[in-house]
Amino acid sequence: MTATNATPALRAAVVINPAKSVGPELRGSIFRLCQTQGWAEPLWLETTVEDPGEGQTREALEAGVDVVIAAGGDGTVRCVAEILAGSGVPLGLVPLGTGNLLARNLGINITDPVAAAYDVLNGTVRTVDVIRTNLDGSADRQVFLVMGGLGYDAAIMADTIDVLKDRMGWLAYVEAGIRKLPGKPVRARISMDGKHPVRRRIRSVMIGNCGRIMGGVEIFPEAKVDDGLLDLLILAPRGRLGWLGVVAGIFGRNKRRNTSVEYFQGKSAEITLEHEQEFQLDGDHVGTGKHLAVTLEPAALKIRMMND
């Protein structure tokens, strides 16, 4: 009698933010989906206020899963990716948030969580870059996948009203942006790849790994999530009509001639500010600081998804 060796079924872990969940039926749907697609019963791990995803992802890695699905908003995705980067275990995305910025940039389904989960289970693996940050010399080097920023854009994230986010979606950020338009510039010294720094009076410095934010706005038109480069944008409006220059610099045709908006590319950047400014990563306000160092790690994260 000949013994047959059955190939063990693949297993997923789902790290889910229960505050973003569309209801208890989602769990049942994903469990049934794994069964019908030939996967083992998934490991289901809920985030908490105290642990928004890192601990759950470590638990998933210890369990030896084949993919870790981040089910939540951009914050959940970032926390899961921070642990998965460099591990070789791929990330899957089930977008449940307001922005879902990485999913939007990758063309992942943001309207149907079960369809997004199906695409993870039946997809293939691609690699993307991650950007590691160090704020004010902290030992905690956080990652982001879409965009980080000091100044105006981070102040918007810090002051967006949660009730409006629930009612209006990404338009709540527009409301906060209008309220935060008044403000004073801060002196900044900015260096790319260790080269001689430029000095500017800025309202915001933004670093991008991919280009699209809410509303389909393309902040970094040349950015690609797997190009081995980070993109840096300086916003330096001048005078009463300075923000009109910023709008023209981002959306106009002659971007390179606009002194209110400047673009740079490289593999690392260092920003030093005269005064502390708000700091955000992938839409999450994470504090204030005067010094930011960022380094790109090419192809550091695997993502399991449907590719066109």
Image (spheres, rainbow, N blue to C red):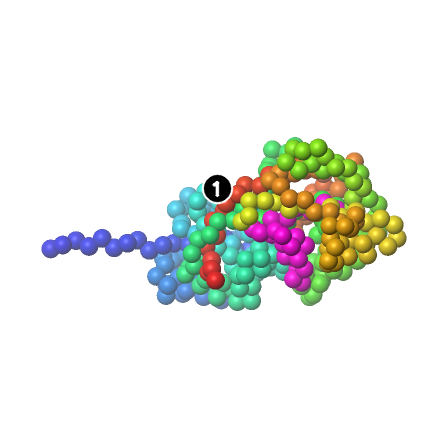
Residue at 60% across / 40% down in the picture?
Answer: 267
- To which quarter of the image does residue 121 belong? bottom left
Question: What type is the residue that disc 1 sits on?
Answer: Gly
Question: Residue 282's spot in the image, x, y percent?
Answer: 63, 50
Question: Residue 162's spot in the image, x, y percent?
Answer: 69, 58
**What kind of secondary structure does the magenta stretch mostly adopt?**
loop
- To which quarter of the image does residue 177 belong? bottom right
Q: Is residue 78 left or right of residue 156?
A: left
Residue at 63% across / 52% down in the picture?
Answer: 222
Q: Is residue 276 above or below residue 41?
A: above
Q: Nearer the viewer, residue 64 or 192?
A: 192
Q: Nearer the viewer, residue 192 or 109?
A: 192
Circle 1: is it few (<14), some (14-19), or many (20+) Cα within 10 Å?
some
Residue at 72% across / 34% down in the picture?
Answer: 197
Q: Secondary structure at mark 1?
A: loop
Question: Residue 107's spot in the image, x, y percent?
Answer: 54, 61
Q: Is residue 222 magenta?
A: yes
**Residue 220 seen in the current view:** yes
Residue found at the very far left of the displayed protein: 1
Figure disc tally: 1
Question: Residue 138's spot in the image, x, y percent?
Answer: 64, 34
Q: Is residue 104 magenta?
A: no
Residue at 13% across / 54% down in the picture?
Answer: 2
Q: Is residue 91 left or right of residue 212?
A: left
Q: Quadrant of the N terminus?
A: bottom left
Q: Is residue 237 above or below residue 296?
A: below
**Residue 135 seen in the current view:** no
> Which residue does the numbered mark 1 point to in the structure image?
86
Q: Is residue 251 left or right of residue 5?
A: right
- Which stretch appears magenta? 204-225
